[in-house]
Image (cartoon, rainbow, N blue to C red):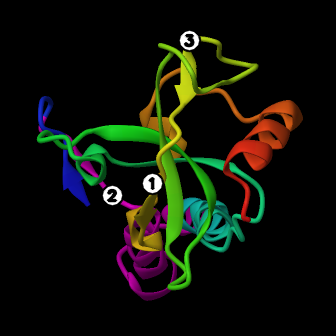
């Protein structure tokens, strides 16, 4: 979890949400059947995100502080691989400037060439960034060619 530096909004990671919804679905005796049904549905979605293999380049969201910024806020990233400790190698996505991979579905954004190792507990849902497009097959092919394992 981190607190957005400007808005003060609490943003919870996928694993923190799994713990929360598991508690509601299986241990909360005060939860209504509708709340339990919703919790089970969210658990399926969140567990799919958490168990992702990241063999292909994948768009994720994490805290911007991982990339040296002072203020915490959601930062779109592309996972381009994993290191020897199974941490995700994530490249931040920025507004387009030059010399980096420009995304097909969102030409106003680009993937930077530097990768930072992230723990899997630092992965958040992509819903925190409005208008974030998914990666196309062409994006994945170019990212593999540029950032692929050697």
Residue in front for this viewpoint, 53 or 103: 103
| Res 124 quadrant in image | bottom left
| Res 16 quadrant in image | bottom left
- Label 1 sits on a secondary structure element that is loop
Magenta-span inclusion, residue 115: no
Q: Marks 2 and 1: in contact by CB < 8 Å?
A: yes
The magenta span reads: 8-37
- The residue tagged 1 is 124
| Left-right relation of 125 to 133 | left
Residue 13 locus on image (x, y percent)? 39, 61
Residue in front for this viewpoint, 9 or 4: 4
**SS assignment for the magenta stretch, majority:** helix
- The residue tagged 2 is 12
Q: Earlier in the sequence, mark 1 or mark 2?
A: 2
Q: Marks 3 and 1: in contact by CB < 8 Å?
A: no
Relative to residue 145, is residue 79 depicted above or below?
A: below
Residue 22 locus on image (x, y percent)? 48, 79
- Label 2 sits on a secondary structure element that is loop
Using the image, tell me which numbered label, if any, was put on residue 108: 3
Residue 61 locus on image (x, y percent)? 46, 46
Discs 1/3, front? 3
Q: How far apart are marks 1 and 3 (CA)?
A: 22 Å
């Amino acid at each position: 979890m981190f607190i957005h530096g400007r808005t003060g909004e609490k943003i919870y990671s996928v694993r923190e949400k799994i713990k929360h919804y598991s508690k509601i679905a299986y241990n909360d005796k005060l939860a209504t059947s509708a709340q339990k049904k919703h919790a089970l549905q969210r658990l399926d979605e969140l567990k799919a995100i958490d168990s992702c293999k990241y063999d292909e380049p994948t768009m994720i969201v994490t805290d911007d502080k991982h990339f040296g910024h002072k203020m915490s806020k959601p930062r779109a990233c592309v996972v381009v691989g994993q290191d020897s400790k199974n941490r995700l190698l994530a490249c931040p996505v920025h507004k387009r400037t030059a010399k980096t991979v420009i995304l097909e579905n969102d030409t106003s954004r680009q993937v930077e060439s530097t990768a930072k190792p992230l723990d899997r507990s630092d992965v958040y849902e992509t819903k925190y960034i409005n208008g974030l497009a998914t990666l196309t097959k062409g994006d994945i092919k170019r990212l593999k060619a540029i950032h692929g394992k050697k």
